Image (tube, rainbow, N blue to C red):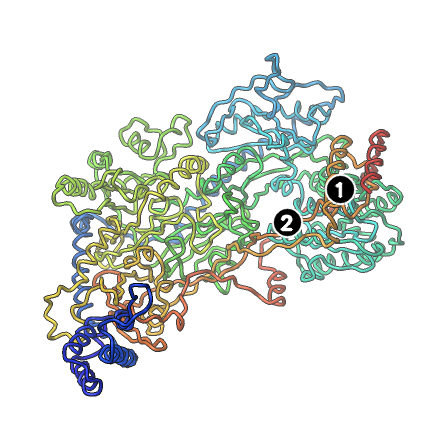
Amino acid sequence: MLSMLLSDKLSLWTVSRFELYMNVSQVDLYFVTITLQRATITGLMQIAAAAGMNCWGPGRAGNATKSDGSGPRGGRLMMLVWIILFSSLCLMVDGQMKIPPETVQQWAVSFSKEIAALSARYSGAKLLQKKYKDIEGMVKIEEVDGEELAKKFAEEMEEMLGRKMKSVKRLAEAAEDADLYHEYNETLEFDYYNSMLINSYDQEGNSVPLGGEFPLEANEHFNKLPVNTQLSNIQVPTNVYNRDPDILNGAYMSEALNDVFIDNFQKDPTLTWQYFGSATGFFRLYPGIKWTSDENGVVTFDSRNRNWYIQAATSPKDVVIVVDVSGSMKGLRLTIAKHTINTILDTLGENDFVNIIAYSDYVRYVEPCFKGTLVQADLDNREHFKILVEELHVKGEGKVKYAMKESFKILNEAAALGQGSLCNQAIMLITDGAMEDFQEVFKEFNWPERRVRVFTYLIGREMTFADNVKWIACNNKGYYTHVSTLADVQENVMEYLHVLSRPMVINHDHDIIWTEAYMDTVSPITEKLFDTQAQSLLLMTSVAMPVFSKKKETLSHGILLGVVGTDVALRELMRLAPRYKLGVHGYAYLITNNGYILSHPDLRPLYKEGKKLKPKPNYNSVDLSEVEWEDTEEKLRTAMVKGETGTLSLDVRTSVDKGTRVMFLKNDYFHTVLNETPFSLGIVLTRGYGQYIFIGNVSVEEGLHDLLAPDLTIASEWTYCETDIDPAHRKLNQLQAVVRYLTGKEPDLECDVLLLQQTLFDAVVTAPMEAYWTALMLNTSGMDDGVETAFLGTRSGLLRFQRYTGIEKRVAKSFLTSTDKENMFTLDHFPVWYRRAAEYPAGQFLYYMPRQDTRDVFRDYEADYSATLSAEEVEHQAEEGGRKRRRAEEEEGPIVISTTAVTVTVGKKTAIAGAIGVQMTLDAFESRFWSITSQPNDTDCSDIEGKCPLRCGSFDINCYLIDNNGFVLISKQRNDAGRFFGEVDGSVMTTLIRMGMFKRVSLFDYQAMCKMNSHSVNSARPLLSPFYGLASALKWLLSNFLLFLLEFNICGFWHTEHFADASAHKKKGDILQPCETEYPSFVYEPSVKETNSIIKCGRCQKMFVVQQIPDSNLLMLVVQADCDCSRQYSPITMEPKEVKYNASVKCDRMRSQKIRRRPESCHAYHPQENANDCGRASFISLSVSLFFICLSFSTIIS
């Protein structure tokens, strides 16, 4: 206001001078003076405009005429107003609003008392702290021994995994014995249960062939899927004939596995799916299920493609893929070659190494960065290669000799330097012919040892060079196949696996393998769950073992019958590391021998693409160093990969509340190896409160009484009692199981006695809270509006809460419900309010607004959810949570959570007993803030220097309430609530950071997904016209139709580039790819209690005052509102920025080989191997009619 910028004396001096010079009357002067004292700048402009308008008015005829008040006197008055306005604007630059800090301090103190009293009253925190204080003489506090804990967890995990391995061994033995006594019958007729056809009937109501009645019943243990626990059944891929003699003989022979499946399940009721994947293509699964096809009626699942099958069937391998890109490979041949490469890549795992070379007149690497080396065939690298393979184009003449030389050099150098797998080595040659004299290459590099196997794939229907290509394979212990159609690729690629398995089969070395973590999105077991767009899928690992033929007559051929295995859900494995033993910030994790994460609470395997959840391309190749990124020297990773037992301490930065808030912790890491597996276990304990655990004891009768209180629940994802062993217990939730065990109704339940003891103790100590909360609720006249829920939680996973408001009036309808995972005890974490309270002084309340968005604010394209949800929760949350959550988000308003820690102290040791708090609406918080921050008109301003009375409701003042991470709770603009203050006012936040009141902390995300523009994956010339594109599309459709009918490419001679363009060209658009990002978090420096400053912004200056709210994590900001600094200060955002590297650094990172532990066994050679079995040419039967149809259509289109 101008009255603050111009003193009364200055105004009078100005007026008197103009009275002298302008001859203006005293009445006019009085009018101008009063007006100036009351006007804003905007008001002065309006006055000036009004003065000008009053000099002229419309005449009766609409023409401008002078008004009666015009003339010399009116002109002088207008000039006076304009001169004073100009003078006041100049004074505004030099003058400055003064916000009295003492007033803001008084407000902060008053608000502190108000919210502290509100929180204390409705939470009952003082009562709960007193109850725990009263029992300090009855409890003992023990320091958690991390080394002993890691050892105990490891032993229990080894025992569990050992039971799975025994089950698999029994399956392998039974399968080999069944085959030994089975005589192959070419004309065998056998009706097995085909999982696609069971319970299917024809039009007359009769069972279809290979169908039949197959009873199915929903089973809790198998994710509530309908299963048959008395029988297994068989799935056959669409591209395999289900009555082929090999299939029928294998199905008949493997019937013997039914009894073993059932016996295994009885001995170990925690077993999940058991299976036998046959080398002939069928898949026997127990328990039997109804298999479903995709939307096209096709079953693409082939067990031989699964990682567990491939790893069990072969030893680790180094593979160089050599592809011919000469001119003769154009069109469909190149398409088949690319598909062959991708199929080979799919057969590789993280224990394998690979590179790809393309050749024509010269040799080039598909990825130039990988020149001369082998890279680990993890999922990330395989997907990278696939993208590059799509960009291959043909040109020139094919000279295979130089490509073979380069391949041998890569493999020889890797072996000499101790790199790669140090086991099998192979070259995969993909070509349409070899004309050169290439024998000298093999003489120089591979003969006579033939250490490197060479597998050849002849592409296309042309057989001219078949003998040359086959000779290469047969003289280098490899295998030759002829691939004439896309449909041939899968079966022909799989042949190399059988060849590599020969030494292991002849030796009868039954190596047990464990896979990396994977998400089975192909089989119907999880496909249904995946399609529901649930929050997460079930990550698992598989244990598998190869099955060999024992028949002496086939010994030298090394016949692999298949692979048996079973799945292990990782969430079940991690249950053996109970959360209550690890403390509020503690956790356990598992890694593989390659350093990749098997299970970790910070592993985020999914991302959102549109409305769909998808696995990230690199979800199972996330390295430990990318999650525990504070381990900059990788000491922790190196020790764990080597299988060592030890400990390490690290200062870490971690985030909570969907990545928005940073915490600084001192973590102790304890690690050890899991024997007979490639896995290592690590546990993390946080120093401070996490170092200690207190133990109390009460009688079962006393504790059980309080455990049955209606306001009490326990952590549903924790294991208080094991309910998965006895089928009769599987329908019990954890609280029901505990009660039945304690009352003696289920004495056979296996329960965690220590956890039950602590839960009963907590139930007794916290029992008075129920009566306290109920008394408050019944006193309706004394209830404050907006206080909705009181809650508490303890380390034992016990949760109590009281709803003060009915569901119809409640703003936070989802708070502390089953869908509110952030605020509940889960397998991965304690509630957010518990974790935040633990890092704040006990007895002082911490206030914050929980994030309302369901995604991580920094990971816009991710599902910010744990990877260890159960399948039941996945399905439930997908069906119920999705719809209800969207509706709740529309209905729910902003809320504030107030929370504080409760401790127990014995001697000099202090442990956290729990956390307690209250949830209220933002309206309830705001009403108290606005009433306190407004001085009345009769305020005594005599001793106040500056603006008085001061009101946050004034137009020239902005008041904010922000938390210790800089997030706005209260602002005049309601949509500012929940935003980072730097986005609201960049000038003030920048100044606070410069003054040291806030500190910027950099965090890193190595699992991010970033948008980047895609490009066409084919570099051939584009389509030239709409008709040309239509013709190409018709040609493609016809070709594929003929492929379906013939199962080979009768139009294989049809080498038009237009066909390749139509099939390979992809639309441009935004795609998501894995990336690394850096994002900021901000934290308040509590040593700075208050500050004020003036920000210079061009022609104006902005004053602000900051005051800490005592005994809280909040700050009050009072900011001058009439000075816009947005041009000088940009907003400070918390948006992540992609970490980009220049080409050289990026290449070095891609080539770098981290320390890894190789598998112990290797089977690369056996002297009795029959290397003469090296493949045969395929014969093509020509359909004359279809040939002429194809030829005629080609002529028309051309």
Is label 2 in a helix, a strand or a loop? loop
Question: Which quarter shows the C terminus?
Answer: top right
Badge 2 crowding class, 10 Å Cα cut-off, few under 14, some 14 to 19, many 20 or more, is few
Question: x and y percent of residue 1145 in the render?
Answer: 60, 67
Left or right of 1179? Residue 129 is: left
Left or right of 747? Residue 200 is: right
Q: Residue 559: which disc?
A: none
Question: Looking at the picture, does residue 658 appear above or below residue 651?
Answer: above
Which residue has dot 1 on it?
Answer: 1031
Q: Residue at x 88, y 45 (%)?
A: 465
Q: Residue at x 42, y 61 (%)?
A: 1134
Question: x and y percent of residue 144 in the render?
Answer: 34, 53
Pointers 2 and 1 in contact (C-beta within 8 Å): no
Question: Which quarter shows the N terminus?
Answer: bottom left
Of callouts 2 and 1, the N-terminal one: 1
Question: x and y percent of residue 583 in the render?
Answer: 34, 51
Is label 1 in a helix, a strand or a loop? helix
Q: Nearer the viewer, residue 228 or 955?
A: 955
Q: Nearer the viewer, residue 88 or 599?
A: 88
Q: Residue at x 35, y 68 (%)?
A: 989
The type of residue carrying mark 2 is: Lys
Left or right of 222? Residue 922 is: left
Q: Quarter-wise, where is residue 185 in the image?
A: top right
Which residue has dot 2 on it?
Answer: 1067
